[in-house]
Image (tube, rainbow, N blue to C red):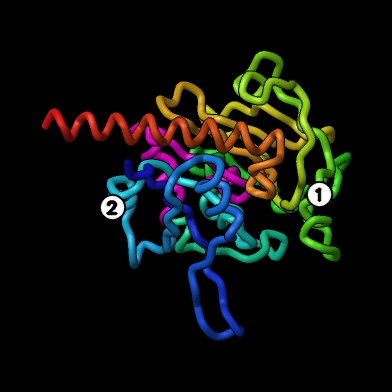
Amino acid sequence: MARPVVGIISNQHLINDQYLAHAGGAMNSEAIAGVSGCLPLLIPADPRFVSVTELMETCDGFLLTGGRPNVHPNEYGEAETEAHGAFDRARDAITLPLVRACVERGQPFLGICRGFQEVNVAMGGSLYPEIRELPGRMNHRMPPDGTLEEKFALRHTVKFTEGGMFHRLMGAQEVMTNTLHGQGICRAGARIVIDGHAPDGTPEAIYVKDAPGFTLSVQWHPEWDAANDPVSRPLFTAFGDAVRAWAARGAKVLKSA
C-alpha cells in the first residue's frame, strides 16, 4: 500500500553563492518518513512552478518547515526594516494561501518555526522582528557556535494549557525543547489558539480553533532527533495519523466516484 504524501516546503538556497536551489533539511524528510510513516516530497515553494491547487491535489498533508528567511512584514501590514532580516517572497506567495486553503478544507499541516509564524500570519496575525530585544525576553536564537548537537540541544521548557490539545497529545503539561528562532508572535491571528509558552511568555505552540483538520504548529524544531525525542515523536506520529486519515478519505471518494 502506497504511503500518503507529505509535501515538505523548501527554502531558496544559493550553492557556492551562485547556483539557486530549492533545499530542505534531511532531518525533515527523516521525521516524515521514519516517524510519521509518510512519503516526503520536497516542494519548490515558488508560484512560478507550482500552484496551491496543484499542491493540495498532489499531497495529502504539508510540513511547513523552518528557514532563515522571514515572512515579509508587508504580509501583516508593517514596513520592512533591517531588523526583519532576509525574506523569501516566493515562499510567502505559496505558503500563506496554502495555510488558509488547508484550514478551510481540513487538509492537515504541521508548522515548524518559520512555518509556525506563517500559520499565524496567514490567519491575520503579526510578528515581532526580534524577540531578544523585548523587555524580559530571553535570546531564542540558535547558538552561533558549536556542533549540531549543541545547537539543537534542549534549552528551555514549554508549558501547555492544562487540558489543552498539546497537553493531551504529549501526556505532560511541561516539556523541554530546543530553540532556534529570532522572531515570534506579536498579535495572534484570528482563530489562533496559543496553547504553549516559553518561561518568558513567548508563544511556542498553536493551533487553529475549530479547524476541521490537523493544524498544530510549534516554534521549536521537533524534526531534530524526532524518532527518539519524547516530545517530537508524538507530534510527528499524530501528524502522520492525520495525513493517513485524509488520504483514506480521498481514496474512499475516488472509489465511490
Residue 73 in view, yes or no: no
Tell me: 224 left or right of 118.
right
- Give the farthest residue toward the left: 257
In the picture, residue 141 is in which quadrant?
A: bottom right
Q: Mark 1 falls on what kind of element? A: loop
Q: Secondary structure at mark 2?
A: helix
* x and y percentages locating residue 69 in the rendered image: 61, 62
Judge left or right: residue 170 versus residue 210.
right
Q: Residue at x 60, y 84 (%)?
A: 17
Q: Position of residue 126 (x, y in %)?
A: 60, 43
- Residue identified by numbered label 2: 54
Q: Which quarter shows the C terminus?
A: top left
- Alpha carbons under labels 1 and 2: distance apart: 37 Å
**Crowding near pointer 1: few (<14 within 10 Å), some, many (20+)?**
some
Q: Residue at x 56, y 40 (%)?
A: 120
The residue sitting at 66% across, 14% down in the picture is 163
Q: Residue furthest top?
A: 163
Q: Which mark is residue 185?
A: none
Q: Residue at x 32, y 46 (%)?
A: 56
Q: Is residue 116 left or right of residue 144?
A: left
Q: Nearer the viewer, residue 42 or 44?
A: 42
Does 124 appear in magenta? no
Report the magenta residues as a range: 94-118
- x and y percentages locating residue 225 in the rendered image: 69, 47
The answer to whether residue 22 is seen in the rendering is yes
Q: Are marks 1 and 2 in contact (CB under 8 Å)?
A: no
The mark that comes first in sequence, 1 or 2, is 2
**Going by the picture, which residue comes out furthest to the right?**
136
Type of residue at label 1? Ala
- Residue type, mark 2 in image: Glu
Q: Nearer the viewer, residue 48 or 223?
A: 223
Judging by the rendered image, the residue that carries numbered circle 1 is: 153
